[in-house]
Image (cartoon, rainbow, N blue to C red):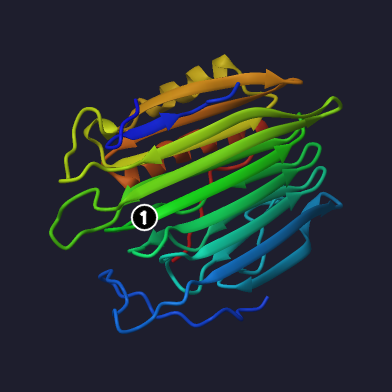
Amino acid sequence: MTSSSSVVISPWAASADEGGRARFAVPTTPRPPSSATAYRPVRGRLELGIKVHNGKSFAARQFHEGALRVLRPHYLDDSGQVCYVVVNPGGAYLGADLFDLDIEVQDDADLLLTTQSATKVYRTPEAFAEQRMVVRLGERARLELVPDQLIAYREASYRQRTHVTLRPSSSLVMAEVVTPGWSPDGAAFQYEELRLRNEIHVETNAGRQLLALDNLLIRPPSGDVTGVGFMEGFSHLGSLIVVDPRVDQALADELHRATSQRDALAGVSLSRSIDGTTGLVLRALSNSTGELDLLLGACTALLRERWHGQEPLNLRKH
């Protein structure tokens, strides 16, 4: 469904230092900086290169500057999977802010990447805020990308672009929850626009091929009009993207059944297969961040236990 006042969900359109400029502290109640203060857009860059040695993954390359950094690595179990937490010291994204992440997981390495807190996008009167991520996965490499929720507040405009290149033997899991921020007058959907784009390529002996182009556009209608035709009356959206040679229709059906346990409207789609690997996207609509966190958590827990013999994620950050 496409219109200027609707959500467009197209799952598979094609089958360091902390040396950045100082920014003001974000108050509990979001409000833009004073018009008397010229806001200087913030830039941040993070690079991580993950290798494996004696069954344990670690960062062989690490660089950060501006408004991005990572906390020290830690290991949640004895699988050898390394976990890094991305931090934005400024606390939020504002107009014309730009954040670049470059993530490489080399052959046989295993990375869990999350964030310290929710990604908050506040008012962006001059230009949209943007995050760009480039991901490269080697043979049998694995990446779990599980950030906290993305929250868009009143008059926010945000773009997020993720470009992934992987091998047929790679394993990719990306989860995300999108929610509108609190508004002083209690109205929902006060942000301007969210554009989330995921482009996934498979590198084979025959060259690089496009597996999936996943576009999500949420452009709320004016006047706070909700209901059928816009998010089907729901306020929150969850997404799960999985690319792995073990993805098939039976798994898609099982994940869909797992969503029935939650107070959400969900659907699952499969991409085409390239050299034995297949993509899967799950979308879920709800009115609760908690419900979507539980839904996506149940799906990722199923994959972690079945494919890797790991416990469900327990990312305690407080």
Instruction: Return the x and y of residue 109 as percentages of the image width and height.
Output: 77, 47
Write the residue at 36% across / 55% down.
Answer: 151
Would you identify the image quadrant in which residue 283 lies? Answer: top left
Write the residue at 24% across / 48% down.
Answer: 189
Q: Is residue 2 left or right of residue 317?
A: left
* Foreground residue among 210 and 96: 96
Q: Is residue 309 visible?
A: no
Instruction: Return the x and y of residue 85 as percentages of the image width and height.
Output: 58, 62
Instruction: Return the x and y of residue 241 as percentages of the image width and height.
Output: 54, 34
Q: Which residue is mark 1?
A: 151
Q: Residue furthest left?
A: 185
Q: Is residue 115 left or right of residue 183?
A: right
Q: Amino acid at mark 1?
A: Ile
Instruction: Return the x and y of residue 42 as percentages of the image width and height.
Output: 51, 72
Write the residue at 33% across / 35% down.
Answer: 7
Q: Give above or below for 237 relative to 169.
A: below
Q: Give above or below for 2 relative to 173.
A: above
